[in-house]
Amino acid sequence: MEKLSSSSLRGWLRFKHLTLITTLAQSQNMHSAARMMHLSQPAASKMLRDLEEYFGFAIFERLPRAMQPTELGEQVIRHAWRLINDADRLVSDINDLREGGYGQLLIGAIPAAAPEILPAAIARLKRQRPRLSIDLQEQTSDRLLAELECKRLDLVIGRLTHVSQHNLFDFEPLLNEPLRLVARHDHPLVLDDKVPDLELLSRWPWILHPLSSPMRGVFEAALAEEGVTSPNNVVETTSIQATLQLLQASDMLAVLPRSVLRRPLESGQYAVLKRVIGKPLDYYGIITRRNEPLSPVAQEIINHLRDLVADLTDSSVLPDGFNESK
């Protein structure tokens, strides 16, 4: 088989090829993909055959009810998404600048980073660049990294979720994140003032992050270590506001990062239970695509984050009853 060359690919591949690949990956149906691209089905089918002939392998497996990507096809689809999103960003930035805009910064952040240093860094950046458009997406690390890889985000404040991701991303640690078991201030377990065991805690209703999140992983690992089954009465959400409201309105329990709890604890509406579940989460940090230069605005907010972490490390003050020894 003849080896592919990047120069040959650049001369042959067209954006309509990339659009077909990604559209077909979403629809898994050639008729639907052709309709969305305003092509006849024979024309779309021929385009796919030309692509597969050029690459020398099947990009999609033809099944009776769907077209599923092959293992090599998954790689082609992932890169096609990156190229399309790169082109979309180019068009968006050019149009924005031509119309008098000042550019855009797309940030993804885990909930733990959102209430602490990230808003302060954004505020500093906006003072320097008041007309810069900033889009902040809050989600779990696994979902944010998928968006970062496909170039739908410029940087992520989160955690790597798999050891192999160091091949795709650069990671600069910022802060570690102690977890706390929290309930409303008049919850029976708070009023009891005893250290509850995990078996008892697992029988209460819980608000937890999805299973794919590092925070949920710490919780489940702690239960498994003591042979305790997972709670069967669970609401899953990544929303801090929804979690806090559910805690107030019910007997539910939650595991939340320390940084998220600073202001709620000061309000007196919530309490931290004496029982610690699991180890602190690993450091969260700045995640960027490897071997790709940063835009000036991305570099500026990273510099602000570094400065804020240095200030926080030097002069962090925790609310009463919220120290690290608990």
Image (cartoon, helix red, strand yellow):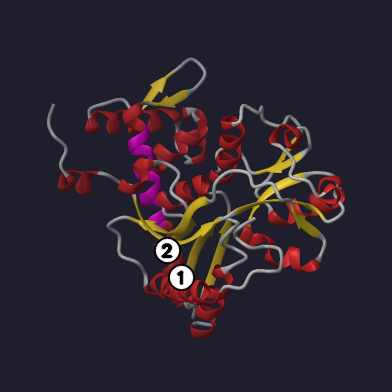
Q: Is residue 165 left or right of residue 269?
A: left
Q: Is residue 258 above or below residue 54?
A: below
Magenta span dominant secondary structure = helix
Q: Amino acid at mark 2?
A: Val
Image point (47%, 41%), residue name: 37
- Mark 2 neighbour class, 10 Å CA radius: few under 14, some 14 to 19, many 20 or more: few
Do residues under tags 2 and 1 come within 8 Å of each other at their CB atoms? yes
Image point (28%, 31%), residue name: 50
Q: CA distance from mark 2 to mark 1?
A: 6 Å
Image point (54%, 46%), residue name: 279
- Residue 280 place in picture, x, y as percent: 54, 51
Q: Is residue 276 left or right of residue 203?
A: left
Q: Is residue 214 left or right of residue 21?
A: right
- Residue 7 place in picture, x, y as percent: 16, 48
Name the residue that disc number 1 marks: 95
Name the residue that disc number 2 marks: 91
Element at label 1: helix
Residue 81 magenta? yes
Where is the C terminus found, in terms of image quarters? bottom right
Q: What's the magenta region? A: 74-87
Image point (35%, 27%), residue name: 71
Q: Is residue 40 above or below residue 145?
A: above
Q: Amino acid at mark 1?
A: Asn
